[in-house]
Image (tube, rainbow, N blue to C red):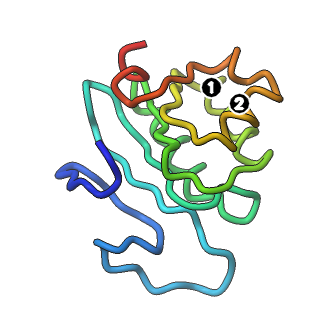
Amino acid sequence: MSYGEAVPAARMSGVGASSVHPAPRAAGPAQAMVVEYERHGVWVVAAHGSCDQESVSRLEEALTTAVRRRRKVVLDTSGITFADSSLLNLLILTHRAGALRLAAPKPQLQRLLEITGLDAVLYVRATIEEAAAC
């Protein structure tokens, strides 16, 4: 399911969604947008935008809550436009806390995963369906 599709069970948070009325923006860094929904029996957290030290907190909150409450969580990374070590750290911590799968990383994130060796530790798949199945 792509970001642009309607997700009836979605819980949206963040700023910058074209189909959502953005919440009033507080001073400070822009947060990555996070959309959550259930698909194929797993909880999907979809991140959109930049995921760096100043913007990853909303995603951190969503993943932390999801792995506590769900048997398996898929992080749809197809909307991540930039990632740094802050996201990699979050992925490691989330993986340690529960069953995390990554779906559809763009080349920049895929390269970070390969360079750090996380692609051998995390379950990384090309689609949400493949990630949900593993």
Q: Please give the residue where the numbered disc 2 appears in the rendered image.
A: 92
> Mark 1 — residue?
95
Measured as percent of width and height from the top left, residue 74 is found at 45, 31
Q: Residue at x 80, y 45 (%)?
A: 85
Q: Position of residue 68 (x, y in %)?
A: 48, 32
Q: What amino acid is found at the position of numbered circle 1 in the picture?
A: His
Residue depicted at x 56% and y 19% = 123
Name which quarter of the figure residue 11 lies in: bottom left
In front of the other: 114 or 121: 114
**Mark 1: which secondary structure?**
helix
Residue 66 in percent (x, y) is at 45, 38
Q: Is residue 69 left or right of residue 117?
A: left
Question: Label for residue 78?
Answer: none
8 or 130, which lies in front? 130
Identify whether 50 is placed above or below 26: above
109 relative to 61, above or below: above
- The residue shown at (58%, 42%) is 106
- For the residues bearing labels 1 and 2, Cβ distance under 8 angstroms: yes
Left of 91 or right of it: where is 114?
A: right
Which residue in the rendered view is the most extreme toward the front?
107
Drawn side of residue 3 relative to residue 15, left or right: left
State which quarter of the image contains the N terminus: top left
| Mark 2, other Cα within 10 Å: few <14 / some 14–19 / many ≥20 | some
Tag 1: Cα neighbours inside 10 Å, few (<14), some, or many (≥20)? some
